[in-house]
Image: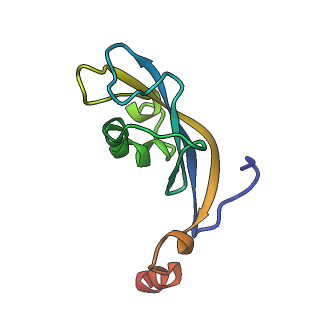
Amino acid sequence: MSQKQKLREDQFELYDLKIVVEAIDGHCTCNMKVGDCFYLRGGKLSMPNESDFCLYALQSTLPLLPAKQRKNHPADWMETDARVICPDPACQLIMRIDRENSRVLNHDDVSPISWESIEDEEL
C-alpha cells in the first residue's frame, strides 16, 4: 500500500509472512531441510507445491503469527525478534518469520459481524 493511500475506517493492514527453516543444529526426524517454508497470507496458510512441513515446528510458530502480521510499536519485541525453535530438543530446528508485502483487508470480509452493526452499537 502506498504511503498516500488512507485506510477506510472499516479496513486494516496485515503483513504477509514467510516462515522459513533457517538452521537445523540437531537431528530432525521429520526430514525438514534448511529453506523449507510456509506462508501466511491474511488468515490462510499455504506451502509451496508438493511440500510439507513438520506439525510440531508449525505449532510452535502459530501463537506468534497474528502479532507478527501487525505493525507494533517500534520498541515492542515483536518488531525485533523473528526466530522460533521447534519444541523437539533433539532437532534444534530454528525458523525465521519474515514479513513480506502488506495487504489491506476489509472488516466484513473476515468477520461475520458487520461493520455497520458495530458502528450502530456505538451511537
Q: Give me the residue at 37% from left, 40% from top.
A: 58
Q: Can the viewer see residue 52?
A: yes
Q: Is residue 68 left or right of residue 108?
A: left
Quarter holding residue 9 = bottom right
Q: 103 or 5, which lies in front? A: 103
Quarter holding residue 61 = top left
Where does residue 110 sit, x and y in percent of width and height?
A: 51, 69
Q: Is residue 93 above or below residue 40?
A: above
Q: Is residue 22 left or right of residue 6?
A: left
Q: Is residue 69 above or below residue 90?
A: below
Where does residue 104 sit, x and y in percent of width and height?
A: 63, 58
Q: How many marks?
A: 0
Q: Is residue 80 left or right of residue 60?
A: right
Protein image colouring: rainbow
Question: Which residue is at the far top?
Answer: 25
Q: Give me the residue at 36% from left, 13% from top.
A: 25
Where does residue 64 sit, x and y in percent of width and height?
A: 37, 42
